Image (cartoon, helix red, strand yellow):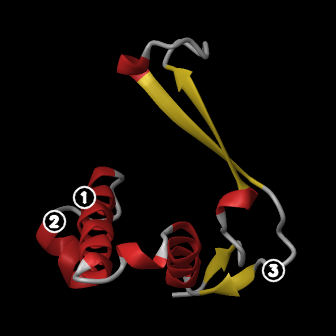
Amino acid sequence: YRTFTHGDPKQANLFFRGKTSSGSTDDDYDELELEVGVIDFQWSGFGLAATDVAHFLMAAIHADRLVDGGEEAYLRYYYDELQRYLVEFGACSTKDDAIRHL
């Protein structure tokens, strides 16, 4: 699938801010929502979304975390969460449906 991608999703190009559901930036973490801002779109264009995911993971994770099964663990976590959110946001009706589409 062709998707509009960022092209350089390293940590330096991402900004995070926690907000409570009421809109304040209090320290009440029970109802905290995460907002993400992205900058530096010089490499953006159409491509495979997995490329941005792979680039981010390789730039964000120290190489020693990828040995002895670490890479497989990160990929499994990503895959499991992707299935869950495909169902939660209505792209697929069930987890089995999500698995068939991946």
Locate the C terminus and report the quarter of the image it occupies: bottom left
Say few, some or many: other residues with alpha carbon within 10 Å of mark 3 (under 14 / 14 to 19 / 20 or more): few
Which residue occupies 59% across, 73% down?
59
Disc 3 designates what residue? 43
Q: Nearer the viewer, residue 88 or 93?
A: 88
Q: Residue at x 56, y 29 (%)?
A: 18
Residue denoted by label 2? 95
User: Left or right: where does residue 64 sit relative to residue 51?
Assistant: left
| Residue 36 shows up from this direction | yes
Is label 1 in contact with label 2 (beta carbons under 8 Å)? yes
Report the mark closest to the observer, 1 or 3. Answer: 3
Q: Earlier in the sequence, mark 2 or mark 3?
A: 3
Three-letter code, disc 2: Lys
Element class at badge 3: loop
Q: Describe the element under mark 2 as helix, strand or loop.
A: helix
Q: Is residue 11 left or right of residue 45?
A: left
Q: At which x and y percent is residue 43?
A: 81, 80
The relative height of residue 55 versus residue 60 in the rendered view (above or below) is below
Q: Residue 55, located in which quarter of the rendered image? A: bottom right
Say which label, 1 or 2, has the lower sequence index: 1
> Which x, y percent locates residue 48?
56, 86
Residue positioned 57% across, 71% down in the render: 56
Query: Where 58 sits versus 36, above or below?
Result: below
The tag on residue 84 is 1
Inter-mark Cα distance, 1 to 2? 7 Å
The amino acid type of the residue labelled 1 equals Arg
- In this picture, residue 77 sits left or right of residue 19: left
Figure check: 93 above or below 54 = above
